């Protein structure tokens, strides 16, 4: 079953630059996909179309039954509840502690503070971060900050997890840990899509698919099942 489908998607910024040009692919339930390519290739733009932060200039994006042609403004938050997103700079709330950074993701969907807190502790515990629950974001290392961001994404039990250059700001050792976590999340059935120019880590994920972008176009789309 296809979770994400791009059909001849082009995105032009300011009427002159093709950030994406005639991009077509589909991603099924449970896949692990890397989007690779140099800075400016269109990786962030591509991910932004999956959670309808950006819309195609032409072509169509379909995600979890919603289409860029027909989705209404009111429906977008419902789609986004099913998609976790993590970023290079984590985007944590710096005036809230770790626990609140995670639980708030559920509170804004209407979950009671008590349940939100309980689920947040559970997820932090699975990522080995329970003992950091009371810490403030500026007291965390880069790797820990990204784990909080992952916890915040996972607490909503998303169908799809998007990661935009997730290890761009962290040391190699923690980066490896982050990739192992993403792999584990995928092993439990979540579709995971990682945009990165950190090719070193490709080898660490055995069952993978790599979509390579260059100047907004798909250069290759290959599946590798064996190292
Ligand atoms: P990547 O994530 O691979 O580095 P991006 O998707 O961020 O690539 O950018 C693709 C191209 O689109 C780049 O040339 C970038 O400068 C341009 N671009 C991205 N966002 C905008 C924007 N909001 N306005 C104008 N140009 C943009």
Image (spheres, grey):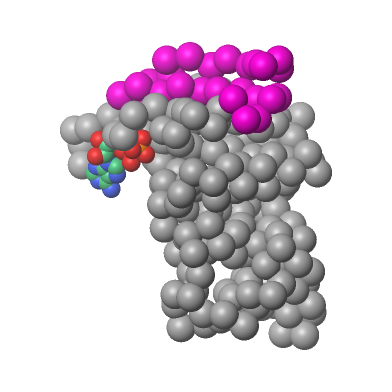
Q: Residue at coordinates 70% horizontally, 53% vertically from top-left? A: 158
Would you place residue 201 above or below residue 116 in this image? above
Can you give x and y, in whole percent of width and height, for residue 16 in the image? 19, 33
Nearer-the-camera pick, 123 or 116: 123
Would you place residue 172 above or below residue 103 in this image? above
What is the span of residues highlighted in magenta in the rendered image? Answer: 203-227
On whether residue 79 falls in the magenta region, the answer is no
Q: Residue at coordinates 60% horizontally, 59% vertically from top-left? A: 147
Q: Residue at coordinates 65% horizontally, 77% vertically from top-left? A: 133
Q: Which quarter of the rendered image does ligand 1 occupy?
A: top left
- In the image, 188: left or right of 145? right
The N terminus - image quarter: top right
Nearer-the-camera pick, 14 or 88: 88
On whether residue 205 falls in the magenta region, the answer is yes
Question: Is residue 57 among the parts visible in the rendering?
Answer: no
Q: Kindly indicate the quadrant of the structure image that contains residue 36.
A: top left
Q: Kindly indicate the quadrant of the structure image that contains residue 153.
A: bottom right
- In the image, 3: left or right of 196? right
Can you give x and y, in whole percent of width and height, for residue 126 in the image? 77, 61
Q: Residue furthest front?
A: 173
Q: Kindly indicate the quadrant of the structure image that contains residue 43.
A: top left
Count the numbered circles shown: 0
Can you give x and y, in whole percent of width and height, for residue 108 in the image? 62, 75
Q: Main secondary structure of the magenta part?
A: strand
Nearer-the-camera pick, 100 or 198: 198
Question: Is residue 17 among the parts visible in the rendering?
Answer: yes
Q: Residue at coordinates 72% horizontally, 85% vertically from top-left? A: 113
Would you place residue 223 above or below residue 183 in this image? above
The C terminus - image quarter: top right
């Amino acid at each position: 079953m296809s979770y994400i489908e791009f059909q001849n998607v082009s995105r032009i910024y300011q009427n002159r630059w093709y950030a994406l040009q005639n991009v077509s692919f589909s991603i099924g339930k449970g896949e692990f996909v890397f989007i690779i390519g140099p800075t400016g290739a269109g990786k962030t733009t591509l991910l932004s179309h999956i959670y309808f932060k950006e819309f195609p200039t032409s072509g169509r994006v379909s995600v979890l039954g919603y289409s860029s042609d027909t989705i209404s403004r009111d429906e977008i938050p419902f789609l986004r509840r099913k998609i976790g997103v993590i970023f290079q700079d984590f985007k944590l709330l710096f005036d809230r502690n770790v626990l609140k950074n995670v639980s708030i993701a559920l509170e804004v969907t209407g979950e009671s503070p008590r349940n939100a807190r309980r689920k947040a502790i559970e997820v932090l515990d699975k990522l080995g971060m329970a003992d950091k629950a009371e810490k403030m974001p500026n007291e965390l290392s880069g790797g820990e900050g990204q784990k909080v961001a992952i916890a915040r994404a996972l607490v909503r039990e998303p169908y799809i997890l998007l990661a935009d250059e997730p290890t761009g700001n962290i040391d190699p050792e923690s980066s490896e840990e982050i990739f192992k976590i993403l792999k584990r999340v995928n092993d439990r059935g979540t579709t995971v899509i990682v945009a990165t120019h950190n090719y070193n880590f490709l080898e660490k994920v055995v069952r993978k698919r790599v979509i390579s972008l260059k100047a907004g176009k798909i250069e290759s789309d290959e599946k590798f099942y064996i190292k």
